[in-house]
């Protein structure tokens, strides 16, 4: 059985190479998450409200942030009359793929902590028409 929530959005900036030159830019990112699993005693895989809450909790960390790879922290120098919220990725670039993998990592950790053995599929839309899709299986806790 598959349960999904769509259209959890956040605004964020990142930089990716354009013609081999890193370009700072921003997007409205939109996240969709599907959970595959067995029906529980209450005849649900996971409650829609609970799934939406879990996704929102992860996405909130990215909302109104600058997303940067950890390797670039030392050379980062941003100043201005604004609040700066950084999200640090463990991946070598701050691409949509890396953002999707980072969000998926956080969701897998949450499902593990809940003791849920499920499959998770995540889509991260960068703008309206482009998206990355990735998935993982949350293993049974031993």
Image (cartoon, rainbow, N blue to C red):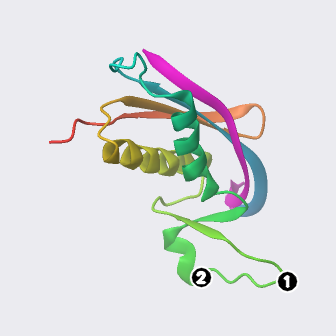
* Residue that numbered label 1 is attached to: 81
Residue 126: image location, x then y, percent: 71, 42
**Rendered position, 49 above or below 106:** above
| Label 1 to label 2: alpha-carbon separation | 20 Å
Residue 111: image location, x then y, percent: 38, 41
Report the side of 64 relative to 88 (left or right): right
Q: Nearer the viewer, mark 1 or mark 2?
A: 1
| Viewer-proximal residue among 134 and 3 | 3
| Viewer-proximal residue among 4 and 98 | 4
The structure residue drawn at horizontal position 82% and vertical position 83%, both measured from the top left corner, is 80
Bin the neighbour count of mark 2 within 10 Å (Cα to Cα): few under 14, some 14-19, many 20 and up.
Answer: few
Q: Quadrant of residue 139?
A: top left
| Viewer-proximal residue among 107 and 102 | 107
Q: Main secondary structure of the magenta part?
A: strand
| Magenta region includes residue 16 | yes
**Label pair 1/2, CB-CB below 8 angstroms:** no
* Residue that numbered label 2 is attached to: 75
Secondary structure of residue under mark 1? loop
Bin the neighbour count of mark 1 within 10 Å (Cα to Cα): few under 14, some 14-19, many 20 and up.
Answer: few
Which span of residues is magenta-colored? Answer: 1-21
Residue 11: image location, x then y, percent: 75, 53
**Rendered position, 15 above or below 78:** above
| Magenta region includes residue 90 | no
Report the side of 126 relative to 37 (left or right): right
The structure residue drawn at horizontal position 76% and vertical position 77%, both measured from the top left corner, is 83
Q: Earlier in the sequence, mark 1 or mark 2?
A: 2
Quadrant where the C terminus is found in the figure: top left
The structure residue drawn at horizontal position 55% and vertical position 73%, both measured from the top left corner, is 72
């Amino acid at each position: 059985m598959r349960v999904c929530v769509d259209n959890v959005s956040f605004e964020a900036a990142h930089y990716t190479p354009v013609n081999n030159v890193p370009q700072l830019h921003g997007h409205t990112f939109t996240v969709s998450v599907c959970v595959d699993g067995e029906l529980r005693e209450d005849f649900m895989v996971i409650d829609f409200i609970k799934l939406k809450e879990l996704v929102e909790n992860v996405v909130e960390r990215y909302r109104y942030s600058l997303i940067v790879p950890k390797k670039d922290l030392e050379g980062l120098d941003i100043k201005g009359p604004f609040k700066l919220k950084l999200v640090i990725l463990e991946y070598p670039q701050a691409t949509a793929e890396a953002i999707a993998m980072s969000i998926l990592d956080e969701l897998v950790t949450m499902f593990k902590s809940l003791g849920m053995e499920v499959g998770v599929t995540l889509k991260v839309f960068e703008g309206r028409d482009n998206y990355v899709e990735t998935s993982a299986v949350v293993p049974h806790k031993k």
